[in-house]
């Protein structure tokens, strides 16, 4: 906890993700809290989702070569041309989307900056932004910074998976809805929205003349025959969709922070206008390295196959330990209900889990609006990551089964 600081928009950000208490003190994020707890106790950290192995050697070699070649000053604000061309080729190859690399693609400092610049460019006080709930905390924080009102539609656990409540989505939209933010494959639930669910979102967007901002950073990490469908590929959606992705999850280079936004030129112009006053540009020698490996479809396929095996390991261990598991169709994460173990408060459980089992997780309620109906409904749910080496996951599951099984 830290003392309250001067008044300002930062307070809205803290409130939006549940970091500000009634007396005005500010807590660290649950991710920072849980990671510190893991370090202090020696618990197996299955809370924060970052890989413990680097991505392709070819990308590292290309980055080193770029540094040695002197590509160490500002990159162009839009991103280096070869990366923009590589993104355009990627979207064409995988999804049949034709993009102009000079006017319809913008390189950002990770997906986070792309999301922030998009929201700040398009909404302000009096507007509404509609997201799924649970939601990635960056989405809520950026909406708070913009001064817009955050409205949500729930993903609900049903038949062992999380599905969109389409009726709630329709009810949540209004003439004030300027942007709908999607995240599919979805963090924290691991859901991959179906074409029918995406078509429902598209119908709402068309009805209310709304822009869709879609966070697709886990686009290649899907399992069991699930298929990621970009909403921009649906009829009438290309001209109203901004698509955000990055190299961090696809190639396990989360620290490089090389992302991109793609969409129609008029929307990209709006995002660029804001983005140039955030970082202007970053990662000059890393951008050509990602451009070189973005044409490699084998590395993401191999990563997805490996993650599917690790997901199964963790799901089996959690089930044996007594959790009710929602088997993820994508991402790094599995959500599990602890109520069958006698824990109705996932936050309290996560704070006790290092002592009880020597494992760290994060509560799903941390991805919900404080006090919302969805937060209450998912109060007993916790999220585990499986983007760790198999021996780490095996040890974590062994500990959980010993403690609860």
Image (cartoon, rainbow, N blue to C red):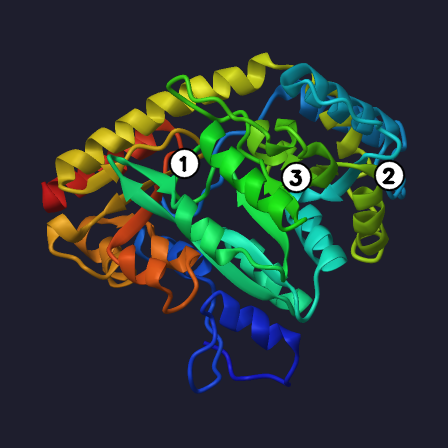
The structure residue drawn at horizontal position 60% and vertical position 41%, both measured from the top left corner, is: 214
Question: Disc 2 and disc 1: Cα gap in Å?
Answer: 39 Å
Element on which disc 3 rests: strand
In which image quadrant can residue 256 be found?
Answer: top right
Q: In the drawing, does residue 144 fall left or right of residue 384?
A: right
Mark closer to the chain start, 2 or 1? 2
Rendered view: 376 above or below 52: below
Residue 88: give x, y in percent of width and height: 77, 24
Q: Which residue position is annotated with label 2? A: 72
Q: Residues within 10 Å of mark 1 (few under 14, many from 20)?
A: many
Element on which disc 2 rests: loop
In the rendering, which numbered label is found on residue 191? 1
Element on which disc 1 rests: loop
The structure residue drawn at horizontal position 47% and vertical position 70%, both measured from the top left corner, is: 19
Between residue 195 and residue 299, name the one nearer to us. 195
In the rendering, which numbered label is found on residue 45? none
């Amino acid at each position: 906890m830290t003392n309250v600081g001067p008044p300002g928009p930062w307070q809205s950000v803290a409130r939006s993700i549940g970091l500000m208490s009634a007396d005005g003190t500010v807590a660290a994020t649950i991710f920072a809290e849980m990671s510190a707890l893991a370090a202090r106790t020696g618990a197996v950290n299955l809370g924060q989702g970052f890989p413990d192995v680097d991505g392709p050697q070819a990308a590292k070699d290309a980055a080193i070569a770029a540094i040695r070649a002197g590509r160490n000053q500002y990159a162009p604000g839009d991103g280096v041309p070869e990366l923009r061309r590589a993104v355009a080729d990627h979207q064409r190859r995988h999804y049949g989307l034709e993009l102009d690399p000079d006017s319809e693609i913008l390189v950002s400092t990770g997906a986070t900056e792309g999301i922030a610049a998009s929201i700040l460019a398009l909404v302000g006080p009096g507007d509404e932004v509609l997201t799924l709930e649970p939601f990635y905390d960056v989405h809520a924080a950026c909406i708070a910074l913009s001064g817009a009102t955050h409205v949500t539609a729930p993903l609900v656990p049903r038949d062992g998976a999380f599905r969109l409540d389409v009726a709630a989505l329709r009810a949540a939209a209004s003439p004030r809805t300027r942007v709908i933010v999607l995240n599919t494959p979805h963090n924290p639930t691991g859901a991959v929205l179906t074409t029918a669910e995406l078509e429902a979102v598209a119908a709402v967007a068309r009805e209310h003349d709304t822009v869709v901002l879609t966070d697709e950073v886990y686009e290649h990490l899907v399992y069991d025959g699930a298929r990621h469908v970009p909403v921009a590929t649906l009829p009438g959606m290309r001209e109203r969709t901004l698509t955000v992705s990055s190299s961090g999850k696809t190639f396990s280079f989360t620290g490089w922070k090389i992302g991109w936004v793609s969409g129609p030129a008029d929307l990209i112009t709006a995002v660029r206008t804001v983005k140039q006053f955030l970082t202007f540009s970053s990662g000059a020698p890393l951008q050509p390295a990602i451009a070189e490996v973005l044409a490699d479809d084998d590395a993401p396929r191999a990563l997805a196959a490996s993650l599917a095996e690790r997901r199964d390991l963790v799901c089996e261990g959690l089930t044996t330990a007594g959790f009710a598991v929602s088997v993820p169709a994508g991402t790094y994460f599995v959500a599990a209900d602890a109520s069958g173990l006698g824990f109705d408060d996932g936050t309290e459980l996560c704070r006790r889990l290092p002592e009880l089992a020597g494992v760290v997780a994060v509560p799903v309620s941390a991805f919900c609006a404080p006090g919302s109906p969805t937060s209450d409904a998912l109060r007993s749910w916790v999220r585990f990551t499986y983007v760790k080496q198999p021996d780490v996951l095996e040890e974590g599951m062994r500990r959980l089964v010993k403690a609860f099984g």
